[in-house]
Image (cartoon, rainbow, N blue to C red):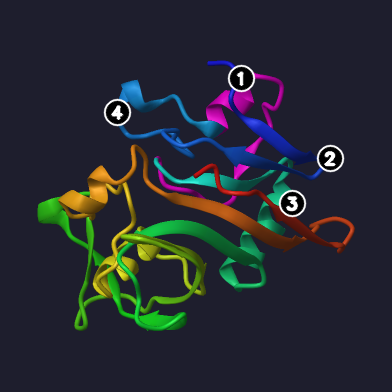
Amino acid sequence: MPLSNIEIVHQDAALLVINKPTLLLSVPGRAEDNRDCLVTRLQDNGYPEARIVHRLDWETSGLIVLARDADSHRELSRQFHDRETEKAYTALCWGQPTTDSGRIELPLRYDPPNKPRHIVDHELGKHALTFWRVVERCGDWCRVELTPITGRSHQLRVHMLAIGHPLLGDRLYAHEQALAAHERLCLHASLLCLTHPQSGERMRFESPAPF
């Protein structure tokens, strides 16, 4: 598949920063017909050395970094593991929170009977922490900035659902009204800060949400 709708935000000898479109996997799925994904498109179109460092969900768009050599991959992976990177997401959520900001600290786990959904589980779940801030209020929905401190699967989607504000267009977690409110999942990785694995320079990338 071509790179036609994949924006390369930054590239150098060590890394690539990509603005991933919605409805594209970050890495290949298990089934053979799910091979099409961001990393294979890059590898097939001039970047055979591209290595995934972190992931965005299939429906989530926005900023993602890939390494171009083993040493850079190791260092970038360490930064994500040690929470030395900064990430923020823009989302549209259903309803109007009673305050303008807050934190959600609820443990999460995979829910096999309802795969690929995740759920809050205070006994078996893994620690998860999200900060949120209202950016704009508009009728039945609001625009929020979400900052995940941990990186659990579906963390932002499940956390916002848990406080009564599911994301618009979320086919896994939204109720009927929130699902019908937008044609896509309204979740976009809009900010990514990291330290360059070779130069040590602190780098900041921003991408406005397409919704």
Which residue has dot 3 on it? 72
| Membership of 165 in magenta stretch | no
- Earlier-in-chain disc, 2 versus 1: 1
Locate residue 158 relative to residue 25 in the image: left or right: left
Q: Nearer the viewer, mark 1 or mark 3?
A: 1
Which residue has dot 2 on it? 13
Three-letter residue code for mark 1:
Ser
Pick the front one: 93 or 199: 93
Q: Which residues are magenta?
A: 39-58
- Earlier-in-chain disc, 3 versus 2: 2
Which residue has dot 1 on it? 4
Q: Residue at the location (29% across, 61% down)? A: 166
Three-letter residue code for mark 3:
Ser
- Earlier-in-chain disc, 2 versus 4: 2
Q: Label 3 vs label 4: CA separation? A: 29 Å
Locate residue 79 relative to residue 148 in the image: left or right: right
Q: Secondary structure at mark 4?
A: loop
Answer few, some or many: residues within 10 Å of disc 1's Cα (few below 14, many 20 plus, some between 14 and 19). few
Residue 47 drawn above or below residue 20 = above
- Tell me the chief SS of the magenta region: loop
Q: Secondary structure at mark 2?
A: loop
Locate residue 116 relative to residue 127 in the image: left or right: left
Three-letter residue code for mark 2:
Ala
Is residue 140 in view? yes
| Residue 142 locus on image (x, y percent) | 41, 63
Residue 135 drawn above or below residue 128 = above
| Membership of 48 in magenta stretch | yes
Which residue has dot 4 on it? 31
Number of numbered discs visible in the structure rendering = 4
| Residue 174 locus on image (x, y percent) | 23, 54
